[in-house]
Image (tube, grey):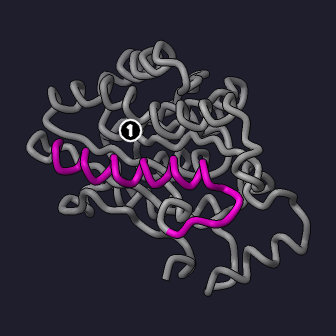
Amino acid sequence: MARLKDKVAVVTGAASGFGEGMARRFAEEGAKVVVADLNGKGAERVAREIGKQAVGVQTDVSQASEIEEMAATAMSAFGRIDIMVNNAGYTHRNGDMLAVDEETFDLITLVNMKAIYRTARVVVPIMEKQGGGTILTTASTAGLRPRPGLTWYNASKGWAITATKSMAVELAPKKIRVNCLCPVAGETGMLAQFMGEDTPEKRALFRASIPLGRLSTPLDIANAALYLVSDEASLITGVAFEVDGGRCI
């Protein structure tokens, strides 16, 4: 299997969860992968386990300079960037929207929104020179069908979906496709914050809102991402792709 042969992918938030799943799945399909994460040791571990076609880099996507360093690492190691996955995310704990302090709100804005802007400013010129590329953002069902208690997170993901659609239209003449994934709540490090607390009762409530009856997994998201960044999806751009077990119906 080599659906991403000769492609170079950069994945943020790739030391765990959905990002790790994508990095591993892309590598299985022939891609060279830059595993970027705030957790530098975790990024290096994932890259080491993938093998010589991967490199790990510590990246805080809330910092413009570190996004630039991440892209420079990709160019130095592999000479190009074909796929940019904005997967790193941040949330406040489920609860009263007025109880979310401004520092937390600002970090949600930096990680879930401004990082997309900053990354585009770095990678779009690279992709344009190469003759094209694809940008994929991990948005959320929260941006389509908001859950109570996650207002500011929901809003950031709605922004990401709108940005995806607008970028897709503007960048199409440059042969750059832009899509986003809308996963339902999954087995990631942020699950407890989404639920407010990680208990069997809370998990049961979340599963009950999903017609197929289960949370998402990193492999679910990685398989959807693989399709959207592959040449098989060459006519698909501006899509908010629901991977949600029917949650948004």
177 inside magenta stretch: no
For mark 1, does the 10 Å Cα neighbourhood hold few (<14), some (14 to 19), or many (20 or more) residues?
A: many
Q: Is residue 63 left or right of residue 90?
A: left
Answer whether residue 7 is visible to the viewer in this image.
Answer: yes
146 inside magenta stretch: yes
Q: Is residue 210 left or right of residue 93?
A: left
Residue at label 1?
84
In the picture shown, does residue 79 fall above or below 223? above
Q: Is residue 130 left or right of residue 195?
A: left
Name the residue: 22% across, 32% down: 127
* Most foreground residue, 24 or 176: 176
Secondary structure under the numbered disc 1 in the rendered image: strand
In the picture shown, does residue 231 fall above or below 112? below
Name the residue: 24% across, 41% down: 133
Q: Main secondary structure of the magenta part?
A: helix
**Magenta-tinted stretch:** 145-171
Q: Quadrant of the N terminus?
A: bottom left
Name the residue: 49% across, 83% down: 249
Residue 221 image point, x, y percent: 53, 61
The quarter of the picture where residue 232 lies is: bottom left
* Most foreground residue, 46 or 64: 64
Residue sitting farthest toward the left: 173
The quarter of the picture where residue 82 lies is: top left
In the image, what residue type sits under mark 1?
Answer: Met
Residue sitting farthest toward the front: 98
Answer whether residue 221 is visible to the viewer in this image.
Answer: no
Residue sitting farthest toward the bottom: 211
